[in-house]
Image (cartoon, helix red, strand yellow):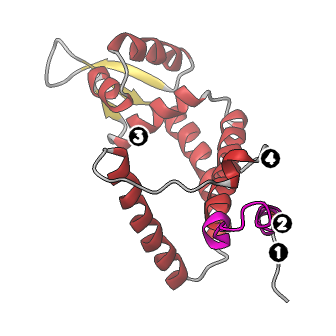
Amino acid sequence: MEHRDWTDGHVARWKPVLPDLDPEIEGAVTRMGKLSVHLRRVREQSLADFDLERHEFDTLHKLAGRGGKAAPSELAADLDLAPASVTGRLDALERRGLVRRTPSTSDRRRVDVELTASGRKTWLGAMDVLGHEEYRLLGALDKDERRQLNDMLRRIMLVAEAASDGSAECPSPTSPASTDSSPP
């Protein structure tokens, strides 16, 4: 007996309404959306557990991605923000002891921003919660299945990225996801 999930019921409800609906496409897209919502909720709970706002986490994350040290201008570019916006973020994070500003050793006119031990611990803690959930979910697949899933999703993303830059046209059949008021 095959196990059924919420999406199976969703597809079954829409198939009589839209006879041309491809249940495999609708099922895959709906499941991806629901997984995305689930992971977003886990991430938001993790941030709350570590007393972080999303923009604070993003700033710590970008800083950690640069080895824990960067110039404010580099962070502004990474975050796609105006330098003044980054200054405000850094002021708040510095008051909380999550980052510190130090004079640059290579340029006296520059300031570097560094993750503190507390900032690194907070960032890693928030990351671990989401990472554990990702491993738990994808643990339902063996290593070869995870590689296959990753390869298939890459192929889909390449089509999406090509369409988003205007270089490709995609057909747009009616989708129940756009007409159903229930969550994806």
Separation of marks 3 and 4 at Cα, in angstroms: 37 Å
In the displayed structure image, the side of residue 99 where residue 111 appears, left or right: left
3 in relation to 49, above or below: below
Badge number at residue 157: none
Vertical arrangement, residue 84 with respect to residue 37, above or below: above
| Mark toward the start of the polypeptide (3 vs 1) | 1
The reply to whether dot 2 and dot 4 touch (C-beta < 8 Å) is no
Label pair 2/3, CB-CB below 8 angstroms: no
Q: Give the range drawn in magenta.
A: 7-27
Where residue 178 sits: x, y (%)?
A: 67, 46
Q: Which amino acid does label 4 sit on?
A: Ser
Confirm or deny contact between disc 1 and disc 2 (CB under 8 A). yes
Q: Which of marks 2 and 3 is nearer the N terminus?
A: 2
Q: Is residue 29 visible?
A: yes
Q: Nearer the viewer, mark 3 or mark 1?
A: 1
Q: What residue is pinned by disc 3?
A: 64
**Residue annotated with mark 1:** 4
- Per the image, label 2 sits on a secondary structure element best described as helix
Amino acid carrying label 2: it is Gly
Residue 73: x %, y % from top left: 27, 21
Callout 4 crowding tier (Cα within 10 Å): few <14, some 14–19, many ≥20: few
Q: Name the residue under label 4.
A: 182
Identify the residue position indicated by label 2 in the image: 9
Camera-side mark, 1 or 4:
4
Q: Is residue 82 magenta?
A: no
Depth check, front residue: 135 or 166 = 166
Report the side of 179 relative to 99 (left or right). Answer: right
Whether residue 51 sits left or right of residue 112 in the image: it is: right
Quadrant in which residue 86 is drawn: top left
Amino acid carrying label 1: it is Arg
